[in-house]
Every structure is written in structure tokens, then in C-alpha cells.
Image: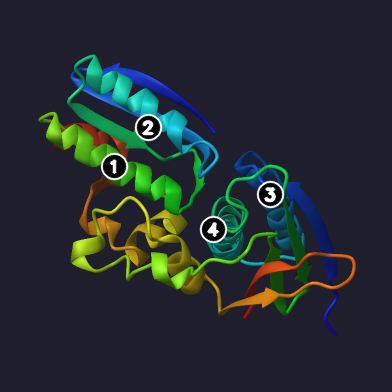
Amino acid sequence: MSFTVARLGDVTVVEVEGQLIVGNRQELKQRVLDEVDKGARKVLIDFERTGYIDSSGLGVLVSLAKRIRDAGGELRLANLHDELQTLFELTKLDTLFQISTTRAHALESF
Amino acid sequence: MAVGESLDFRIPSDVQYIEGIVGQVVARCTALAWSRRHVALNVPVALTEALSNAILRGNGDDVRRSVMLRVRIDDVQLVAEVRDEGQGFDLEACTEDATLPENLHREDGRGLFLMEKLMDRVERFRDGGDGDSAGGNVVRLVLHRA
């Protein structure tokens, strides 16, 4: 997995490339928390280039959502392909996150 | 008649090895024209869960212990056996229904849930070993192609 972090207006956009799984999820968590420590409050994770996510990766997203909410912000998600959408539906995490079909829609929704 | 093959792996108890061997299994499924959903969701996620459970819970994250994976794939089904070298653990005891409202905010507890949702059958048993091996826990995942 690799990821990029960019600031678009007041939204911090994190793009995840590859798999978000047990072997690398802490990297993503720490990077996002570093941004929150620096003041980021609107965080968008874009999964357009993501392969699959395991339960550890899902757990990190749940953890980040809570940490960002506790800091007065919000984590939103975008660009889930069909299989990732199914994963979120199976776990009912689609009810926990605001998920947009495109990055543009997500940016508008903040 | 099913045309298939077997893949065998032995890795140290280190989660960094998971992605590579899962990628090899997925590549074989792709070569055998399994569906997009199977190769992008069911197989990689369930296999990752079984391997991480074997490494972190079964072997206690002890790199001196190994995890074995044997996969048989053909145009009918995939059977994957993940074997650790641990003393055993109660997977059910650390897993609740991940979709209950009171569990939705939990970081953990979705591993077995996902294996059971994404596979047609999940079996867990203790292999007592023989003269050449000490035995361990085995998780068998079965997924039908149709």
C-alpha cells in the first residue's frame, strides 16, 4: 500500500493505493492522525485506487472516524468500487460512514 | 472434469508476508477465470483473515513459529487450509456479530464474521500432528465457483 495526502481547500484528501490490511493499516492511521494533530478536521479517504480491505483495515477506519469526531471533525469516504461497497454493506459500516460515489461529490458534501 | 492445481506456502509469523502469498492465490484464481467478485473480495479478504488469525492469535505473533497455507483451486471450488503451530484459541469467544448496533463502533471482531460471510464453508479443527510435526490449529476455507 502507498498513499498520498493532499489539501483541497479545507479538506484533507488521502488516496489509498493497493491493499489496506493488517500489515500496513498502522501507517495509514498514523499519517491521518498526524494531519489531525496539525489541524485537519475534514478528512476524505479516496479508495479509487484501492484493492481490498480486511477487518483490520476496516477497524482503522472506524478508529479514525472516532478520533476525528472527538477532535470536532469528520471522516468521509469516496470512490468505493463494487466489491468494497459490498464489504461495507456486509459489515453494515455503510451505515456508519458517509460514502460518496466520487471525490467531487464528497468535496461538495462537506 | 476439474482442472486444477495446488499451491503450498510456509511463512514465518509476520503479517508482512500475507499480501504476497494472497496475491499469488488470487493470480491463480484469475488465471482460472474466477469471477471479479471472487478475486477482488471473497478470496483475498477471507484468506487474509485466516492468515492473520493464524499469525497473531494462533502463533501469538511469534516469528519462530510458521504458518502453512495449502490451496487447491480448480474450476469448481477453492479449498484453502491455513495451519498454525500454536496451542489453540477460541475464535468464537473473541468474535461477536459485527453488525449489531452495539458492535458497529468496535475496531476488532470482524475477522471470523467476514470469513463466514465470504466463504461457503469455514471449518476449524485441531490437528494433533504426527511424528514429523507438532500439530496446530487448522482453518479450512471452501468457496464454490458457481
Q: Position of residue A98 (x, y in %)?
A: 21, 47
Which residue is farthest top? Answer: A38
User: Looking at the image, which residue is at 72% across and 49% down?
Assistant: B65
* C-alpha distance separating marks 4 and 1: 19 Å
- Disc 3 with disc 4 on a shared chain: yes
Mark 3 burial class by Cα count in 10 Å: few <14, some 14-19, many 20+: some
Front label number (3 vs 2)? 2
Q: Nearer the viewer, residue B70 or B144?
A: B70
* Position of the N terminus of chain A by quadrant: top right
User: Looking at the image, which residue is at 51% across and 36% down?
Assistant: A24
The three-letter code of the residue at mark 2 reads Lys
Front label number (3 vs 4)? 4
User: Looking at the image, which residue is at 82% across and 59% down?
Assistant: B8
Q: Which residue is mark 1?
A: A63
Q: Nearer the viewer, residue B127 or A110?
A: B127
- Disc 2 with disc 4 on a shared chain: no
Q: Position of residue B30 (x, y in %)?
A: 71, 59
Asked if labels 2 and 1 touch by Cβ distance under 8 angstroms, the answer is yes
* C-alpha distance separating marks 3 and 2: 23 Å
Q: Which residue is mark 4?
A: B49
